[in-house]
Image (cartoon, helix red, strand yellow):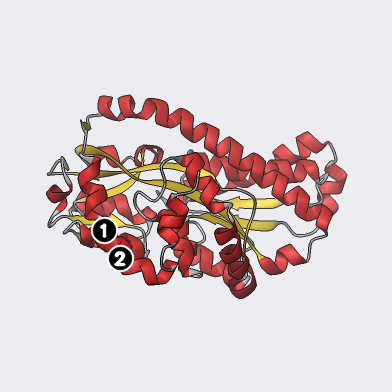
Amino acid sequence: MTNQTINTSRRRVLGAAVVGAAALTNVPALLAQQAKPWRLGHQYNIDHPMALGALEAAKQLALKSNGRLRIDVFPAGQLGTGKELVQQVSDDSLDITIDGPGQFGLWQKPLTIFEVPFVARDWDHLVKMMEGDWARGHFKLLAENQNLRKIGTPWYYGSRHFTTNNVALKTAADAKGLKIRVPESPLYLDMIRALGGAPTPMALAEVYLSLQTGVADGQENPLPTINSNKFFEVQKFLNLTAHIVNPMLPLISEKKWKALSPADQKLVTEAFEAGGVAATTALRTLESRLLGDLKAKGMTVVESDRESFRTAMKPVYAKNENVWGKGVLEQLQAMK
């Protein structure tokens, strides 16, 4: 993406958030008088469901507050990588970001459990885990100790699958020796090492070029991310492993949150709940058709042996048990 394209995208996104809010609230005079907007930075391309959800949250907040509370959205890693964005919110130099447990779990390590491979049976099970007493306690610590407050319930990011260029992953053993790009999270490094591969951590914006040049042999992400980032142009095999049901969470500076009145906190929560519904709905719609689309774009779809991947993850569970707490994985998986 060129600088000109990024700047154009940024103008469009910011314009959509502010102009859309003005049209809906019909209070242009008030919009001109309001306080400085919050900044929300994320790493997703502007056509990705997470980006659409962020814009919907911004629009709804302007609507619900009659233009008093506004958000400017900076997509596609304009303000930094995922890890950098979470750090900026923690430092109170950025107001809001959206990321997953593998990332914000670096600031409250037990929360990484919600991005461990095969932790949940399905999306509803994962949400129940993340809204339970154990999780609430750790999210409270994340806010108190790291200035990172989660807003509302999780957003659905999709089920993650591996893509590869030269080797189809029919079983977990086929990943041995491959250089696999992963997010900058220790849990993902453990996952690839357990498969006998070489983990190659990097920001999402760097992945396409790394796959194109052979720096990495493969990567893993949900179907909408694979499509949005055009990985089908540089990857041959789409290996259906569904090894992680992936949640995302909006995170706001706890200092900013505490400065709000209870009524405004409710407005912010409601706006991001609406953004989450929009993102989740769009993502599920994409997932339902993207398998065929990616196949039509030239990818070979592989029905991987998921049980072999699940079995290969046992060392990951054993290594991280001291991080999550003894018996916590089993306790969460047993939730009905």
Report x, y in % for residue 249: 55, 52
Front residue (pair 245, 135): 135
Q: Quick one: label 1, few (<14), some, or many (20+) residues within 10 Å? A: few
Tag 2 and tag 1, C-beta contact below 8 Å = yes
Label 1, secondary structure: give it: helix
Report x, y in % for residue 184: 37, 63
Front residue (pair 280, 309): 309
Front residue (pair 189, 135): 135
Residue beneath label 1, please? 314
Specify whether 321 is left or right of 57.
left
Residue beneath label 2, please? 318
Report x, y in % for residue 323: 41, 70
Specify whether 275 is left or right of 302.
right
Answer yes or no: is residue 80 visible.
Answer: no
Answer yes or no: is residue 160 visible.
Answer: yes
Task: Say which amino acid is labelled 2.
Answer: Ala
Q: Quadrant of residue 210?
A: bottom left
Q: Determine the residue positioned at 30% across, 30% down.
A: 294
Q: Quick one: label 2, few (<14), some, or many (20+) residues within 10 Å? A: few
